[in-house]
Image (cartoon, rainbow, N blue to C red):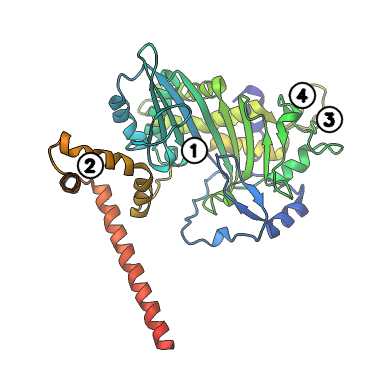
């Protein structure tokens, strides 16, 4: 952290009372509005219609609250390598440890005609440049990044930060489980009284322009608070993660999306800080060190973009005291450790993925089998199935067993309901 942040945070208490700002409007919003998950990882928006009972869905397993009340993670990573990997097969072999298997899909994406996809929304664009260098652009969403253990996350970030030509996007995310400041609170705190779409800078320090500040698009406003332009080097989104995740993460998410040089600088700084700590700590791996420093690094990135101080106290902003709720957020973020959530894999998810990613690919291979392999498409498919069963991994065996068990339980439940209905008639 910068020195001024450390000085203030070091004297702060570890918890803060929930801000009373906008309490009436917040309660009104919670009691009346329906919501839907966002597209493009941009926060949660209010929609019209009846309220959705997101917290009652049995399929959602709530995450455990972090010890210090704030969780940190890498919410997104996009990087482009040019000439670093010699072949696509070499890259796939390296990337498999982080994103799993990548298979071709029949689509164009970001100007790439050759596109591969993986589980949970991973996408890879491939092209050969005029000079013969192989260009690879990889998008990795939070669901995959949060499933990596610290050593694997360090290895991925190191390769992106030190060897990628560009890191086009990196999201630094902080989940505030104490909810010391909600989007509605921020809207009231930072909106100019004369013009609600302009910034009130009495308690806010940022280089962002007024034109880069906006409230959520919903009819009541306040469900997502934005600061920073869509095309700039940074944009902050603050929203109710519990709504977006259907109750999985009961926190207010501070999502700082970094782009371009700012994104690469953040990744490099994180990796270098981890390596420096590991070098000074015998027996500590770089992955464990990464987990130790990520909270401080992400808190520093947040403070670099926006700060909340009582600017009425001094003409010199650096001497103005930081607001208590922001002190608590930054302090706890500095002590936080990255979350590691292993995503559940089911046969239903595998079917959904295969139905999108594989049909045209498998059909092309099957139809070409007579002149490539000398067998009919049907025999080629049967041979592929036999080979797959022989080499099925222990993970996929357990997924199959769980799927069969779930199917049998569902079948018994249907039969039980049918028997009860017949008895009632």
- Ranked by sequence position, the earlier of labels 1 and 4 is 4
The numbered dot on residue 312 is 3
Residue under numbered circle 1:
337
- Ranked by sequence position, the earlier of labels 1 and 2 is 1
Q: Report the front residue among 274 and 184.
A: 184
Is residue 145 positioned above or below 248 on the image?
A: above
Q: For the residues carrying marks 2 and 4, which lies nearer the camera in this image?
A: 2
- Ranked by sequence position, the earlier of labels 2 and 4 is 4
Q: Is residue 181 left or right of residue 92?
A: right
> Label 2 to label 4, Cα distance in Å?
68 Å
Using the rendered view, name the quadrant where residue 371 is placed.
top left
**x, y percentage for residue 50?**
65, 61
SS at badge 4: helix
Residue sitting at x 65%, y 39%: 328
Quarter occupied by the C terminus: bottom left
The reply to whether the C-beta atoms of the residues labelled 2 and 4 are less than 8 Å apart is no
Residue sitting at x 48%, y 62%: 58
- Ranked by sequence position, the earlier of labels 4 and 3 is 3
SS at badge 2: helix
Residue sitting at x 34%, y 31%: 95
The reply to whether the C-beta atoms of the residues labelled 4 and 3 are less than 8 Å apart is no
Residue sitting at x 72%, y 37%: 214
The numbered dot on residue 366 is 2
SS at badge 1: loop
> Label 1 to label 4, Cα distance in Å?
30 Å
Label 3 crowding class (10 Å Cα cut-off): few <14, some 14-19, many 20+?
A: few
Q: For the residues carrying marks 3 and 2, which lies nearer the camera in this image?
A: 2
Q: Is residue 345 visible?
A: no
Quarter occupied by the N terminus: top right
């Amino acid at each position: 952290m910068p020195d001024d942040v450390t000085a203030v945070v070091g004297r702060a208490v570890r918890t803060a009372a929930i801000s009373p700002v906008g309490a009436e409007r917040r309660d009104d919003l919670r009691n009346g509005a329906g919501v839907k998950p966002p597209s493009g990882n941009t926060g949660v928006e209010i929609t019209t219609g009846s309220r959705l009972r997101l917290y009652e869905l049995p399929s959602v397993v709530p995450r455990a609250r972090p010890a210090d009340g704030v969780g940190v993670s890498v919410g997104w990573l996009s990087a482009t390598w040019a000439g670093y990997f010699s072949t696509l097969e070499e890259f796939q072999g390296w990337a498999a440890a982080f994103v799993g298997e990548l298979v071709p899909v029949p689509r164009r994406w970001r100007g790439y005609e050759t596109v591969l996809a993986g589980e949970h929304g991973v996408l890879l664009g491939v092209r050969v440049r005029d000079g013969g260098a192989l260009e690879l652009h990889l998008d990795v969403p939070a669901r995959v990044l949060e499933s990596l253990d610290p050593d694997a996350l360090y290895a991925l970030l190191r390769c992106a930060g030190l060897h990628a030509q560009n890191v086009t996007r990196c999201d630094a995310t902080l989940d505030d489980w104490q909810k010391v400041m909600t989007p509605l609170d921020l809207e009231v705190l930072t909106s100019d009284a004369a013009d609600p779409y302009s910034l009130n800078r009495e308690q806010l320090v940022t280089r962002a322009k007024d034109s880069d500040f906006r409230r959520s698009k919903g009819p009541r406003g306040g469900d997502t608070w934005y600061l920073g332009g869509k095309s700039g080097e940074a944009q902050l989104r603050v929203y109710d993660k519990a709504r977006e995740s259907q109750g999985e993460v009961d926190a207010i998410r501070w999502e700082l999306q970094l782009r371009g040089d700012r994104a690469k600088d953040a990744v490099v700084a994180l990796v270098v800080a981890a390596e420096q700590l590991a070098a000074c700590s015998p027996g500590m791996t770089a992955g464990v060190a990464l987990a130790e420093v990520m909270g401080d690094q992400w808190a520093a990135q947040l403070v670099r973009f926006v700060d909340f101080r009582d600017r009425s106290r001094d003409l010199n902003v650096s001497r103005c005291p930081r607001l208590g709720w922001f002190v608590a957020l930054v302090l706890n973020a500095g002590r936080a450790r990255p979350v590691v959530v292993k995503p559940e894999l089911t046969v239903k998810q595998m079917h959904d993925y295969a139905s999108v990613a594989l049909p045209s690919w498998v059909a092309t291979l099957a139809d070409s089998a007579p002149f490539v392999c000398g067998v009919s498409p049907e025999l080629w498919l049967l041979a592929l199935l036999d080979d797959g069963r022989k080499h099925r991994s222990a993970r996929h065996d357990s997924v199959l067993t769980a799927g069969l068990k779930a199917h049998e339980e569902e079948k018994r439940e249907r039969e039980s309901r049918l028997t009860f209905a017949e008895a009632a008639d």
